[in-house]
Image (tube, grey):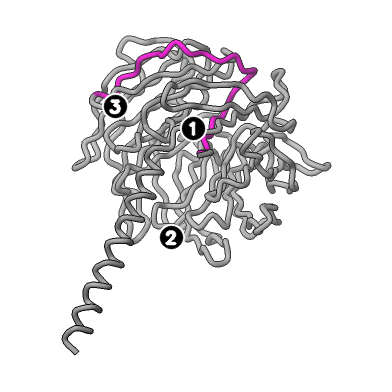
Amino acid sequence: MVFYKWMTINLLRFLQLLFLIALATVATAQKSTKKYLLFVGTYTDKGSKGIYAYNFDAASAKLTSLGVAAETTNPSFLAIDPTSRFLYAVNETPTYKGASSGAVSAFAIDKQTGKLSLLNQVPSRGADPCYISFDKTGKYALVANYKGGSVAVFPIGRDGQIGEASAFVQHAGSSVNKERQEGPHAHWIETTPDNRFAVAVDLGLDQALVYRFDPKTGSISANQLSSASLDPGEGPRHLAFGRDGKFAYVVNELKSSITAFAYERSGGVLRKLNTVSTLPKGFTGSNDGAEIKVHPNGKFLFASNRGHDSIAVFSIDNRTGALTPVGDFSTQGKTPRNFEIDPTGTFLLVANEDGNNIVVYRIDPKSGRLTATGQTLEVPAPVCLKFMAID
């Protein structure tokens, strides 16, 4: 009896050891992944053909062109599903099949060639959709319609096809800038880190609206649970959560600033902390804020300036959420609409919309400062970058 008990205990220990070894092997494999596909969304009314694809080697930062992945109209923002089998693009157009709406396109990804095969396309439920993201289950895509001033949720089938909207909310109101804020302009929407809420950033309303999100049905509440107001005329554009989810940061397009919020997870409440400029002192030219990202290590925040044509870098105080300027770095091209940090956290790639190029920078892991690698890609009107691991 004692022998069998001894054997049982040791067998369990052996199985636990095998499990830990398996976990370590998977973690090592994920960490050692260095090869990726890079997909580039563009504006086709500025001379491009659609979505472009590149091979990216994170060990050398080498990018190799794979050509046009798919021809589609104005794929201004992209999202890749968690299984890495499908890619989705908003088609930023004012009309679709005669209605006041843009479209959302679903594609199957060929990992070997980078080519995209169209699965289906549905109306976005509002004019000029400009942002798309996935909820944390990967079963629903959330879309912001800029000119339509609305947000919508779409179910994703097992075959990758996108279904008709499972939820739709029309925003209403305006703010102080009569040219840019004459009505609602939804610019960004994502679910919170715990997937309980959906936050929509509306440039026209100077607000970040928080809705309840149901991951079982893909529904969002018709009326916002809460809202966070930006200063009048700030024109909020995109939002990024800090690594631990305790803080959130909004880049304001019209005032070239970043507003920091404390995020209360229990009620989905954003509480304003402070606002800092993305521009260096003394700059007097015109500028629009665009993209914002938090580094995977949670220590640094990056934001792009269109006009000053730079990336502003800040260090993050993980205790208070406060931002401290590190510096600003030229993007070596005009109008940096979007940028992306590679999955290893080593490189930052900037899409210069009017410079028709993508410039690669190395990120200093200690300071967050950027150094150009010398790699520049010529791409017509690039406006969105998305990475996907392929090994």
Q: Earlier in the sequence, mark 2 or mark 1?
A: 1
- Residue drawn at the location 57% of the way across and 49% of the way down: 142
Cβ–Cβ below 8 Å for labels 2 and 1?
no
Extreme residue toward the left, this view = 2
Cβ–Cβ below 8 Å for labels 1 and 3?
no
> Is residue 380 rendered magenta in the image?
yes
- Considering only vertical position in the picture, is 129 above or below 304? below
Residue carrying label 1: 35
Residue 40, x across and y down, in percent: 59, 28
Q: CA distance from mark 2 to mark 3?
A: 29 Å
Occupied quadrant, residue 76? top right
Extreme residue toward the right, this view = 98
- Residue 104 seen anywhere in this rendered image of the structure: no
Residue carrying label 3: 314
Extreme residue toward the bottom, this view = 1
Q: Is residue 171 left or right of residue 11?
A: right
- Residue 151 seen anywhere in this rendered image of the structure: yes
Q: Which segment is the magenta one?
A: 367-389
Location of the N terminus by quadrant is: bottom left
Residue 148, x across and y down, in percent: 65, 42
Q: Is residue 314 left or right of residue 200?
A: left
- Considering only vertical position in the picture, is 209 above or below 364? below
Residue 196 numbered mark, or none: 2
Q: Amino acid at mark 3?
A: Phe
Q: Amino acid at mark 1?
A: Lys
Decide which of 101, 235 is in the foreground and name it.
101
Q: CA distance from mark 1 to mark 3?
A: 28 Å
Q: Amino acid at mark 2?
A: Arg
Q: Looking at the image, how many numbered discs can be counted on the residues?
A: 3
